[in-house]
Image (cartoon, helix red, strand yellow):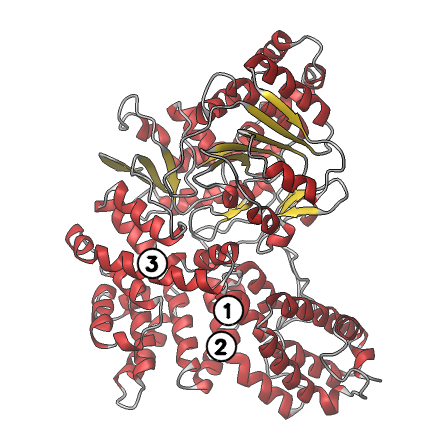
Amino acid sequence: MTLAEHFPASAKAFPNLLPWQSPFDWIIQGQFLAEAVFELQMKLQESDNQLDAFCEALRADVEAETIVQTDPSAAAMIDGFRFVTSQVQIYRTMTSGRLGTCYHWLLWSISREHVFDRTENHAEYRLPPYASATRAMNGLALEVAVDWVWAAYIVAHKFGGLDGHCSDFLEASLWIARRAGSGNGVQALTAIAVYSAAKKLGSTQAQVDALLECLDHPEVPAADKAKIQIAMSTNVGYYTDTHPAEWARRTLCDLRQELKSHEPLQLLAVTLQNQEAWLSARAEILSEIQSLTEVYRLSYSRHLARIALDSRILLVHPIIAALCKFGSTDDLMAVLHAWYAEPDAVCADGDILFICPNHGDGVAYVWPDGRYFASGSVADSLENALVANSNALNEYFRGPQGDRQVTVDDRLKSTPAFEFAAEIWKAMDDHYKLSEVTSRLPQGWVPRSVVVMPAHRDPLQAMILDRVGWVAPLETSLGVADALRPIKTLSIWPGATQTTDAEVEVLAYVAGAAGWHVKVTSGTLDREAFRQFYEDAEADLLWVIGHGEQVSDDLSRTGIVMEDGDMASLADITSFDLPGEGRRLLVLNICSSATAQTFNGMARSGLAQELVSPRQQVIGHLWPIDYYAALAFGSSLAVGLMREPPPAALRAASLLMRDQVKLINVLTEISPDLQAIQRLSGQRAAEVTQNVLSWGCPVILT
């Protein structure tokens, strides 16, 4: 058989990359092919799109080969090939912050049965060496295995989902890392130690003692010493006689020349034990953050830079935790602005309510002239809240207790399960304890925005409304916003849904009553039409009806679905011009428009979040929204915007949409003939709109 017959998808998609018509035998040539493909992948890194497409085709071919292969020796050679040719993608996706994709590459590389992108997998996983593979193939696999170990323990620590595998493969991973020796081997050993210390594994002390012994050896290179001491500045340091902060200071003093671009910041963060230390290091920390973020912005597109920065957000966690104790809201804004905001953006003021749901001293609330830590065991309450959130949204959100067994139907993934609404509301109430905070906040104060770090995909804005009484936008841009335009022109994108005509009708009547000029896009609703709609300089309020898609790690599959089935992707829309003076309002009344990836940081990587800027405020939905709820919300928001600015209008809409009788009365006053009245009058509509997973789904971002 030829190489093309073994790899039909790859040969068809990339006819010029390899000699596809050459004869091929797994036993004789498998190792040479693995080497050739590995080298080819290294070269293809210059073109991310081409490498991704090639690796996906290769993965499909390997899966097909695995199914039909009956020779145990050939099957083992395929195992080795799979492992070797996954390593470039593992490294790329991890270092670029695509941790969800990296997670699947890690597991697919060591399994014949793992299904890529499936939430639940029940497969067998094995690290090399492979019993029936040739010595040469196993040698090649073991040569790159140290890279797998390093990535696996970092992803396990930052992202999750690998606790069982890291436990099962601990001894094998330690053996692989020690076998690799200096450089990559030490790097892998420190990754294992950091993970083990965070998990408080029984073997941690022995690992730390071995690292200390290595550190004291006179022939150990300075670069390896720096890696070890950086590990000691984490929880690993608590297994020594020296505090992590002292390890950090020592490394900054003695080994700074050996540090990588992000490591000075990592170490400086650990030294912040009091306000004096912060004031002394503030300028240096902000400078280090700006230097690091510049590296990412020069290396990636705007969206991919955000994802990459999210993957490094643990670097600033100690800073945020410290500032919750003794810093100001201006300090918190300065740190987050330096990390997240566009280089030319001016930092917004500190008139915010800052919330840290994961703080070790309890949920932290910080406002301009005060702070409060909600009482109770934050680890237990956060775990319960994330379990409830997982159930309510048919998702898997990992909590502080680590991985847990879940059952998620991938066909319904992210779709709200209304029967769990009471559970998530109670779990959030037990965790956030907003009733304890309300009396401590300044009377009559409404902040400019609410900043949540790290953010979770929960209806927190709705709970603040319910418990405190006001709505403030969730902070996204961190920059000073332009003055909001008064609404003179409303422009509507009427994408096809079950209730589009009814919603457009309500909008038209409301606009007439408010004195707004109305434009409704007509003709072919394709990507070019959407560009013209989005770039309309006259529109002060853009209103999108239709269907949205959100795919983690993939901006080309996140966006707004067009009439022809094509998509105006996030990459497309962020390239469109945003004309006109002042700040306009964009309403994305579509599913998942404000769904964001959250890797222990702010909720920044999503469609609505990416479209927020000083010149555009955005309202969207945290998850897929039922069409009754979308119609009720759209109608209620339009009524609110007649009289009030966007945050207050969203508050009014949230209250109105869940009160069926009042909403129907309001719509009847507008016009008794509205289609929306009939659509929203039934029992099913009432059940949907009264559920917190409906009225808690919309959010306003700034």
Q: Earlier in the sequence, mark 3 or mark 2?
A: 2
Q: Quadrant of the N terminus?
A: bottom right
Q: How many marks?
A: 3
What residue is at 26 percent from the left and 58 percent from the top? 285
**Residue 243, how many percent across, how many down?**
22, 65
Q: Is residue 277 found left or right of 537 in the rendered image?
A: left
Q: Which residue is mark 2?
A: 173
Asked if the residues shown at circle 2 and circle 1 are in contact, with their CB atoms under 8 angstroms apart, the answer is yes
Question: Is residue 657 visible in the rendered structure shown here?
Answer: no
Measured Cα–Cα span from mark 1 to mark 3: 29 Å
Nearest the viewer among 387 and 34 is: 34
Q: Is residue 432 above or below residue 411?
A: above
**Residue 606, how many percent across, how many down?**
54, 46
Residue type indicated by callout 2: Ser
**Residue 453, how many percent across, how many down?**
39, 46
What residue is at 57 percent from the left and 38 percent from the top? 392
Q: Quadrant of the C terminus?
A: top left
Q: Is residue 130 above or below residue 544?
A: below
Nearest the viewer among 40 and 132 is: 40
Q: Please give the label number shown on residue 152.
A: 1
What residue is at 26 percent from the left and 26 percent from the top? 442
Q: Which residue is mark 3?
A: 290
Asked if the residues shown at circle 1 and circle 3 are in contact, with their CB atoms under 8 angstroms apart, the answer is no
Numbered disc 3: secondary structure: helix
Numbered disc 2: secondary structure: helix
**Residue 273, how many percent across, how many down?**
20, 55
Residue type indicated by callout 3: Gln
